[in-house]
Image: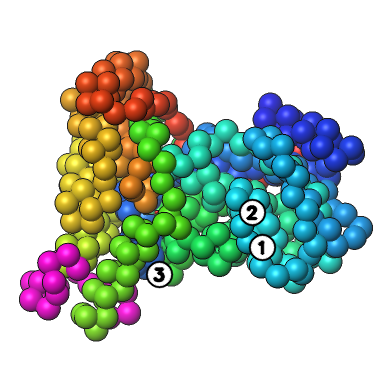
Amino acid sequence: MILAEQTATGFEKQFGYKPTGVWSAPGRANLIGEHTDYNNGFVLPFGIDKRTYAAVAKRNDKTIRVATSFSSELIEIELQEAKPEDLDWALYPLGVAWVMRQGLGSGFDLYLNSDVPVGAGLSSSAAVECCVALAINDLWELGHSGQDLALIGQRAENEVVGAPTGIMDQTASMLARADAAVLIDCRSLETEVIELGFGAKDLVVAVIDTQVSHRHSDGGYKSRRDSCELGASTMGVTSLRELTAADLPRAKSLMDDVTYRRVRHIITENDRVLETVEALKSAALEKLGVLFADSHVSMRDDFEISIPELDLAVETAVRTGAIASRMTGGGFGGAAIALIASSKLLELQEAVARAFERADFGPARVFAVSASAGARREL
Ligand code: GLA
């Protein structure tokens, strides 16, 4: 609650009056299922206990003003103007407002605050999009469902920010539940809440943030997406979701090696998501070790989105006794996750610090996250 109140205070200092309300949405960590979302496949993310807060009030005119705790800039635009461009952090809230512009009769004032690390692969951007979308939805009584708001957030990301990302992050941020992950079928957009039960076993999910930052509006993410589309069209299907492991020999005979490996990652990763769900449902957590390890190797060697810092993070976590570890998120930087006994968290922090120093990498940050609720009104 403290950050929510600070956000309300920040708003008041900035704009000189009290906000109507404060809304929040979490960042996310993905347990497993990477780059499968835009291939209509399966993903298994959870909301983390780090959130972005938006204090908002409607205005009587058409002006939209946005400010934040981490920049002294106040950005002001008029509603219904052309698509916002070149506005750095403000593109996220203004992108959502732009997508929702038809429902907005007037402008608004908005103040953002967040403790979601930026560029760490924990979806700080989806957290902004989702709390702003929910605030607008509530204030103008637009009646969108959580899933609709996730799609609105994704459109802001794709059409305004320019990152060709899938639907995982916004769905996780909107629909997350405490102590649970959300299985998302990205073809039907159906979701199922999967209880995690880590706390009962004294386990935590540690995030190892390499502090190598990434942006998905740069080339690597899009080139993976293009390869997947090429793979699907070569196989005569609308998405790689339609394929199974039985299709791999034919895929190999039809594709160049790189495209084939991209396709193999997606097909095998979809299977690993479903196997992880089975393991969680039967409380067979030891099975996650192999599934996460295979997922990481597949991302490193077939999809080629890992970096040496992430490989070292995973290796160090496993050596320190993590039950399971893999890189999480889009890759090219960001974080790895490790499921580890809570009593070993300190040891993991020390081991990562030593290993990164020895490898001459910049320092990594290691912290535990717990599965938390999705977007909601706070005040
Ligand atoms: C980023 C994107 C998601 C997803 C992941 C990789 O987080 O925003 O849509 O594609 O990468 O799984």
Which residue does the image show at 31% across and 73% down from the upper left? 229
Between residues 25 and 71, which one lies in front from this camera angle?
71
Q: Is residue 57 left or right of residue 360?
A: right
**Residue placed under numbered mark 2 in the picture:** 87
| Amino acid on which the number 3 mark rests in the picture | Arg
**Disc on the earlier residue, 1 or 3:** 1
Q: Are marks 1 and 2 in contact (CB under 8 Å)?
A: yes
**Residue placed under numbered mark 3 in the picture:** 187
Asked if residue 251 is among those painted magenta in the image, a careful observer would answer yes
Residue 374 against residue 337 in the figure, above or below? below
Q: Are marks 3 and 2 in contact (CB under 8 Å)?
A: no
Which residue does the image show at 28% across and 55% down from the upper left? 274
Q: Secondary structure at mark 2?
A: loop
Which residue does the image show at 14% across and 74% down from the upper left? 255
Q: Is residue 186 visible?
A: yes
Tell me where residue 185 appears, x and y as whole percent: 39, 63
Q: Find the distance from the CA under tag 3 to the CA under tag 2.
A: 32 Å
Tell me where residue 251 appears, x and y as whole percent: 14, 74
The residue carrying pointer 2 sits among few (fewer than 14), some (14 to 19) or many (20 or more) residues within 10 Å by Cα, namely few
The residue carrying pointer 1 sits among few (fewer than 14), some (14 to 19) or many (20 or more) residues within 10 Å by Cα, namely some
Q: Secondary structure at mark 1?
A: loop
**Magenta-highlighted residues:** 237-259
